Every structure is written in structure tokens, then in C-alpha cells.
Amino acid sequence: MGRDVMGFDLRTPGGDSLDTFRFDGRYSILGSGAAYSHLAHTPLHYQRTPALMSDGLDELTLTASHSPHGGAVIGVGNTETAVPSGAVLLVSKTRAHEVVIPWDATTYTLQIPRAALAPLLPTLEEAPLHILTPGAPGADSAGLALAYAALISEQGTLAGAPLAGAVRHLHELIASAIGAHHAAGQTPPDDPAHNVPRLALIQRSIHARLDQPGLSLDTIARLHHTTPRQIQRLFAAQDTCFSGYLAEARMQHARTLLASPAHRHRRVLDIALDCGFADLPAFGRAFRRRFGLTPGDARQAP
């Protein structure tokens, strides 16, 4: 997977035995403009060697490794630099380098062709290398790009224009990260490049918590380290609001469960509770207002 798919040589650090080496990965090609990988591994050493560079690849890679034990080390020539756990390493495949992660870790990587970023960032170097530590200029955009790439990979159903649009948002986020790093000033929190990916991740958090009757705007804001006002602004750009989106998500989830043969054996009350309603009468009234039929009618519909 390393050399053939990602363009790196992978091995254990310091010649450690392969008997205990573990490398579990998911690799997703996101159209022609991006690739994402999610790796769970034991200590790992990967290299982009001069010999490998003959493949002509010029992608920029964003990598973040998370381990309770510590971060990683990147070596370029005779210089080694620490990469803290949770920091985003942005480096070009046109630069020979090696990275050692000396612990069990989870590593996320996003690869973007340089040609996709060059029109968005005229100041882009030929072989960039940046370490974006949490709180540093550009780190928010880079972290959001990795999280949004993970969401696209998990969905696995985007194609055509929707996928191209999502990948374009990735390009804009990475250009924003590099641009903020160059300017040595934090990207404004309402940078338009952030809006669609950030809203998509907020919506995922909402759908994962539909069974919580007290799910609130404040709760979601705390989860995403932002303000309720900022979340409302994101929803307003889509001509809706937090409460409206949440109510519609609950209703659509309920209708899906009621129509599913896999849930035919369950009581309507149990489905109502799964969708965040505290009692059956309130669920019935809301369902009838939205769809013009009772939950029982929806269950019997062909």
C-alpha cells in the first residue's frame, strides 16, 4: 500500500521485528482531485526517497497523527524537527523526507495534486513544508480539511458534480491553510472556504444525536468549539435554522425507520424515542403535521 498507492516506503522504526507490526488502513480516492487515508498502526517509519521521486508525483500531503504518547519526527536532509501529536504536517512529495512515528497511533492523510492548488494560491512554493500546530495560523483550516475528507470518505456515495464540489471545498480549505500560514495571521473564522465543510460536520453531529430529546444549539456549538451564533449563520446561508434542520432530521429519520422492514417489529413509541421525542402523542402530532398521515399509516404504506 505504501509505495504503490501512496508513494512512500513504509517500514518499522530502527529495524524492529515485523512480528508485532500492525498497519490497518482505509484508502479512498475522492475523484481526480484528492485521496484520503485513515491508518491505525504500531510504530511506523515512512520515507519519500530520491529514488521514489522519479515517479513524478507532486501531491501535497496533509498528515495528522494522534497518540497519547506523543507526536512524530520529520527528517529532511540532516535536520530533524518534532511534529507534536495533533499537529498537521503539510509537505510536498517533490521534497525528499522521512517521518518516524515511534508509538502506536492513528494517522490521517489527505493528498492533493499541486496543480489543483496553484490557481488558488499564486504564492505556493515548489516544495512546501509546514508544521501547523494547534492554534497556529492555518491549523484550523488544515484540521477542517482532514475532518471533511474523512466525512466524504465515510459517505462513499458522492459522485459526479456533488463529489467535484466537495473536493473543490477541500482545495479551498488547504489553500486557506497555506495562505494563513504565509501571512502569519489566523484565518478569519467566517472564511467562506470553511462554511460548507464546517456545516457538513455539524450536520453529521446532529444526525448522530437524534435520540437525545434535549439536543440543543449550545451543545452542538460546544462540540465544534464555536458559538451558537456562528452555527445559526451557517444554517441561514442554507435558508434554514438549527431548530428547523433538527426537526426535519428527526422527522425524516422517523419515517425511514417506520418504513423499514428491519424495524417492523418495534413499537412506534420506541421509534419515537429513538428520534428524540419524549412521548407518543407529541410524536404523532408532529408526524401528522409534517407528512399528513399518522405514524401507523406510514408504517402500512407500500
Image (tube, rainbow, N blue to C red):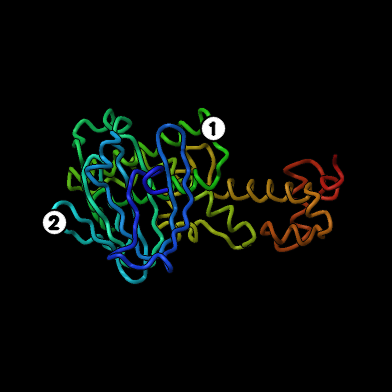
Tag 1 secondary structure: loop
For residue 90, the mark is: none
Residue 54 coordinates in the image, percent (x, y): 26, 36
Residue 223 coordinates in the image, percent (x, y): 45, 60
Q: Can residue 192 be seen in this view?
A: no
CA neighbours of label 2 inside 10 A, class few (<14), some (14 to 19), many (20+): few
Looking at the image, is mark 2 or mark 1 nearer the viewer? 2
Tag 2 secondary structure: strand
CA neighbours of label 1 inside 10 A, class few (<14), some (14 to 19), many (20+): few
Which image quarter holds the C terminus? Answer: top right
State the separation of the CA atoms marked 2 and 1: 42 Å
- Which picture quadrant has residue 4? top left
- Whether 225 is drawn above or below 293: the answer is below
Residue 234 coordinates in the image, percent (x, y): 45, 43
- Which picture quadrant has residue 166? top left
Residue 33 coordinates in the image, percent (x, y): 40, 33
Mark 2–mark 1 CB contact (< 8 Å): no
Q: Could you tell me the amino acid type at mark 2? A: Thr
Q: Mark 2 points at which residue?
A: 79
Residue nearest the viewer, comparing 250 with 110: 110
Which residue is drawn at the image coordinates 34% and 58% (left, top)? 11
Q: In the drawing, does residue 204 fall left or right of residue 134?
A: right
- Whether 176 is drawn above or below 71: the answer is above
Residue nearest the viewer, comparing 21 with 178: 21
Which residue is drawn at the image coordinates 48% and 40% (left, top)? 236
Q: Mark 1 points at which residue?
A: 159
First-in-chain label (2 vs 1): 2
Q: Could you tell me the amino acid type at mark 1? A: Ala
- Whether 142 is drawn above or below 87: the answer is above
Q: Can residue 276 be seen in this view?
A: yes
